[in-house]
Image: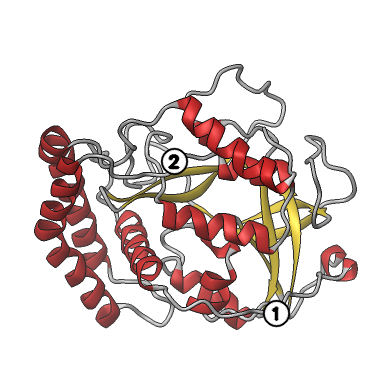
């Protein structure tokens, strides 16, 4: 079940933000053409003085132009691919069982540690650090990013060293070359005292195919390195494979959708200009999510099957599917 420490306003704000994200993912249907962004200039990357623009590192659904430029209305001035060896990609932010089990996040990485020999989960098989896109945005657009990610209470705004990557690179060098530049990113740590709603195994849940498509589409748009794209395509997505899971999904939505819709409607009414909701609302949201995940763990999962991982996946089928996709494109396969 969810951690009992998830009673803080920070957790409630994060859950409200996740619910907004889920709604936008499932209501985005119009695909609009967005022109390719110019590369960020070396002088801007090297500048350490106070600037009129902000460098923002994206690694999840914000890689996608449909999500970042379309749904969120951000207008980046430029962009550049980046390697961030101090961070690793994770999928440990809880969503909603049977629909959107988890969302992307990052964690700090020990760059001196040796990669594990065996990884139980495909999403943990990349050991070269985070790969993402650094956007140059205006302060106004950066405030919009913060607001759509929970008004600054869902995540910590941190600055991390980044190394530029040329578009279309085949293989990422584990040891980046050149001089780093600093960029802002949003980070939600998994710890015992930060109050974040947590699942027992941070790597167990699988993201939905719809959510992963936003990430892989964004990676293709920005021509991220081929071996990193192979890793992303190799991540298994959550799929309902049993009729009882489908029934469980319908019953779960029937029970919890009124509460979730109420959170969305009331949240828009009480949130301030930065998208931050009051403490009482954040606490109420947290308790609703604790109840939702508690009902899943104690009732729905036992009666209707897994709402976080696909039932019936086999390693061989998954690996062969990825190899076929990438061999057809003549790209590198992990």
Note whether 34 is above or below 233 in the view shown: below
Mark seen at residue 190: 2
Q: Which secondary structure lies at badge 2? A: loop
Q: Image quadrant for the N terminus?
A: top left
Q: How would you rate the neighbour count of disc 2 (Cα within 10 Å): few for under 14, some for 14-19, many for 20 or more?
A: some
- Work out whether mark 1 precedes mark 2 in sequence or the reverse, and give the earlier one: 1
Residue drawn at 10 percent across, 35 percent down: 303
What is the spatial separation of the Cα atoms under label 1 and label 2, in whole angstroms?
A: 37 Å
Which image quarter: residue 81?
Answer: bottom right
Q: Say which of 246 and 56 sits in front.
A: 246
Point out residue 149 in the picture as x, y percentages from the top left corner: 45, 66
Point out residue 235 in the picture as x, y percentages from the top left corner: 51, 40
**In front: mark 1 or mark 2?**
1
Residue placed under numbered mark 1 in the picture? 35
Residue drawn at 42 percent across, 38 percent down: 191
Residue drawn at 27 percent across, 38 percent down: 3
Q: Say which of 279 and 124 sits in front.
A: 124
Q: Image quadrant for the C terminus?
A: top right
Q: Is residue 285 left or right of residue 49?
A: left
Point out residue 32 in the picture as x, y percentages from the top left corner: 56, 80
Q: Is residue 103 left or right of residue 131?
A: left
Q: Which secondary structure lies at badge 1? A: loop
């Amino acid at each position: 079940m969810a951690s009992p420490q998830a009673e803080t306003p920070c957790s409630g704000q994060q859950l409200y933000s996740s619910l907004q994200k889920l709604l936008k993912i499932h209501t985005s249907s119009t695909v609009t053409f967005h022109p390719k962004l110019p590369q960020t200039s070396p002088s801007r990357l090297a500048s350490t003085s106070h600037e009129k623009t902000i460098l923002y590192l994206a690694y999840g659904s914000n890689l996608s132009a449909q999500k970042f430029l379309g749904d969120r209305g951000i207008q980046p001035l430029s962009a550049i691919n980046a390697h961030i060896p101090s961070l690793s990609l994770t999928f440990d932010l809880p969503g909603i069982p049977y629909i959107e089990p988890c969302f992307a996040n990052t964690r700090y990485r020990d760059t001196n540690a040796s990669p594990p020999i065996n990884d139980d989960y495909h999403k943990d098989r990349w050991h070269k650090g985070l790969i993402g896109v650094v956007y140059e945005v205006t302060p106004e657009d950066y405030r919009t990013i913060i607001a759509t990610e929970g008004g600054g209470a869902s995540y910590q705004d941190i600055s991390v060293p980044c190394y530029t990557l040329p578009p279309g690179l085949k293989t990422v060098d584990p040891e980046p070359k050149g001089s780093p530049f600093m960029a802002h990113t949003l980070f939600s740590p998994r710890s015992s005292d930060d109050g974040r709603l947590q699942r027992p195994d941070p790597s167990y849940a699988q993201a939905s195919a719809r959510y992963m498509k936003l990430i892989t589409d964004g990676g293709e748009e920005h021509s991220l390195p081929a071996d990193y794209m192979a890793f992303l395509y190799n991540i298994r997505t959550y799929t309902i494979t049993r009729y009882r899971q489908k029934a469980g999904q319908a019953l779960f939505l029937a029970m919890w959708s009124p509460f979730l819709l109420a959170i969305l409607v009331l949240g828009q009414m009480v949130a301030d200009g930065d998208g931050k909701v009051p403490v009482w609302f954040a606490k109420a949201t947290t308790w609703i999510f604790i109840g939702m995940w508690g009902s899943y763990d104690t009732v729905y999962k036992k009666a209707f099957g897994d709402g976080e991982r696909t039932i019936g996946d086999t390693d061989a089928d998954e690996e062969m599917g990825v190899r076929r996709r990438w061999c057809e494109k003549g790209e590198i396969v992990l």
